[in-house]
Amino acid sequence: MLPLTMSRNIEFTEYVDANGRSPFSTWFDALDAVAAAKVRVYMTRVELGNHSNVEPIGDGLSEIKIDYGPGYRVYFRKEKEILLLLLGGSSKRGQQKAIDAAKLAWKSFDSSRKQRARKEKGTKNAIN
């Protein structure tokens, strides 16, 4: 018999750029209520471990394909084993532009993270 509970929850968090904006929220907030609900259902499925509608898009990023309306997409990067960083969303029509923007967002996030790590390491070395 298969276990009914999952050993680990995966959760989404939103990428926020240097200006405090979330590309995902900007896109998601513009959806109508039905589309937003459909997108959220697919995201919940991924959080629960169902990756049947997830495809790689390059540079370590993936998209959730939502089979509704114009073919919505949610772009993300998996970090560690429990965090999925939301980088944006689009319809099928705006897919390539949104993928390019998601890749740029990831590079910005990763660069900032590495800079913070170097600063923290430098601070620790200065204290010791």
Image (cartoon, grey):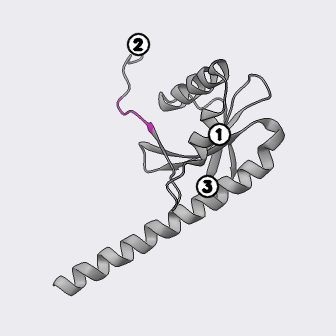
Residue at horizontal 55 percent and vertical 48 percent from the top: 22
Q: Is residue 8 magenta?
A: yes
Q: Quadrant of residue 37?
A: top right
Q: Residues within 10 Å of mark 2 (few under 14, many from 20)?
A: few
| Magenta portion: prevailing SS class | loop
Left or right of 25, for residue 9: left
Q: Residues within 10 Å of mark 1 (few under 14, many from 20)?
A: some
The circle on residue 1 is 2
In the image, residue 79 above or below residue 109: above
Q: Name the residue at the right extreme.
A: 93
Question: Magenta segment range?
Answer: 7-11
First in sequence: mark 2 vs mark 3: 2
Quadrant into which the N terminus falls = top left
Q: Secondary structure at mark 3?
A: loop
Quadrant into which the C terminus falls = bottom left
Location of mark 1 (residue): 27
Q: Secondary structure at mark 1?
A: helix
Q: Amino acid at mark 2?
A: Met
The circle on residue 60 is 3
In the image, residue 32 above or below residue 113: above
Q: Amino acid at mark 1?
A: Trp
